Image (cartoon, rainbow, N blue to C red):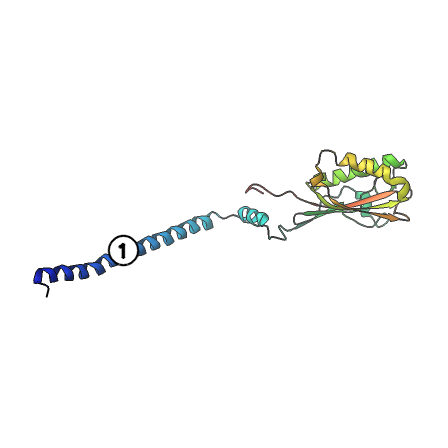
Amino acid sequence: MADESELEMVLGSEQAQPVHSAGFTRRTLVGIVGSILGVLAVCTVIASTDTPSLRANVLRSAPQQKWVGKSEGAIENKFQACDSAGGTPQIAEAYISGDFIFTSGVVGFEEICKSVVKDQDAQFKKLFEMLGKSLANAGVKPGDIVSATSYHVNMGKTIASFIKQRAAFFTGITKSQYPAWTAVGVSELYYEGQLAEVTVMARKPPCMTFEC
């Protein structure tokens, strides 16, 4: 049988253990609560500094986001002669919707909305010059085009000249920036002597700052 001193040591050990465990538990709880309060403080700071531009940037960078921004409508129309019922149908030079720009059919005009350049090479050169201006008016560049469709009269005899001018238009961009492109042969286009027309869809480049 254990004497009194041995019994006190055993009882002392058994009684000390719960006190030690309780102390450990309290410290752990204090640490957890502190962590939670810290997270809440950070969330409060973020919420208080949130701005529309910050939210827009977060949405813009989210890979799953399908739509960003609002429809801004038609950009400033440079082709005022097309606005009358006596001319071509009322059209916008380009339309901005969210991050995307959609152009109307671009033509190698000699006189805006009335006639085209008669010379084949010159007509195609003028077409791409006007396409570049339409994109610039909307705030994008040739490298931002993601899809294009071109319509050709007598394609077999005109396509080589068209491709030459298109190559000049895309000077300075890499192959990874080439857009999807569909060429369609047609019997005629709107204007007398018109050999080609191009419509494109472009996308604004991703915003990399909070000031977008």
Q: At which x and y percent is residue 77?
A: 75, 44
Query: Pointer 1: what residue?
Result: 24
Judge from the rendering whether residue 52 lies leftward or rightward of residue 93; answer left or right. left
Q: Amino acid at mark 1?
A: Phe
Q: In this rendering, would 25 be left or right of 107?
A: left
Is 121 placed above or below 59 here?
above
Across and down, in percent, residue 185 comes to 87, 48
Q: Residue at x 90, y 43 (%)?
A: 156
Q: Where residue 70 appears, x then y in whole percent?
A: 64, 51
* Percent coordinates x, y for residue 198 in the rendering: 80, 44
Q: Residue furthest front?
A: 1
Asked if residue 53 is positioned above or below residue 166 in the image, the reply reads below
The quadrant where residue 80 appears: top right
> Which residue is nearer to you in this view: 10 or 54?
10
Residue with the most extreme left position: 4
Q: Label 1 neighbourhood size at 10 Å, few (<14), some (14-19), many (20+)?
A: few
